[in-house]
Image (spheres, helix red, strand yellow):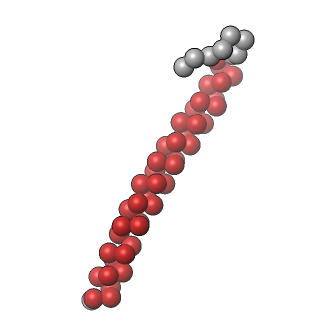
Amino acid sequence: MFVPQGYDLTALEPIGHLLAVDLLLIHIGFTLFLKVGILLPVICMIDMHG
């Protein structure tokens, strides 16, 4: 990670950590969204035919 001179790395570290957590949560949320988006119609179709 490139840090401009004058910036304190320890001050930027929590921000980087939060961004990593955010990206992880977004990834998990997107994965769940995809699974629900695929599974929900399938379950509904089975219910209608059953």
Give the residue drawn at x 58%, y 32%. 17
Rendering coords of residue 49 (x, y %): 27, 88
Total marks shown come to: 0
Q: Nearer the viewer, residue 17 or 1?
A: 1
Q: Residue at x 70, y 16 (%)?
A: 7
Name the spot of residue 19 as percent of width and height, x first: 58, 36
Question: What is the x, y in percent for residue 29?
Answer: 49, 54
Residue placed furthest toward the top? 5
Asked which quadrant contains residue 50, the reply is: bottom left
Q: Residue at x 51, y 49 (%)?
A: 26
The answer to which quarter of the image holds residue 13 is top right
**x and y, in percent, of residue 33 in the image:** 45, 61
Left/right of residue 34 with respect to residue 3 in the rendered view: left
Looking at the image, which residue sits at the far left? 50
Above-or-below relation of 15 to 2: below
12 relative to 47 in the view: left or right: right
Residue drawn at the location 46% of the way across and 54% of the way down: 30
Q: Is residue 21 above or below residue 42?
A: above
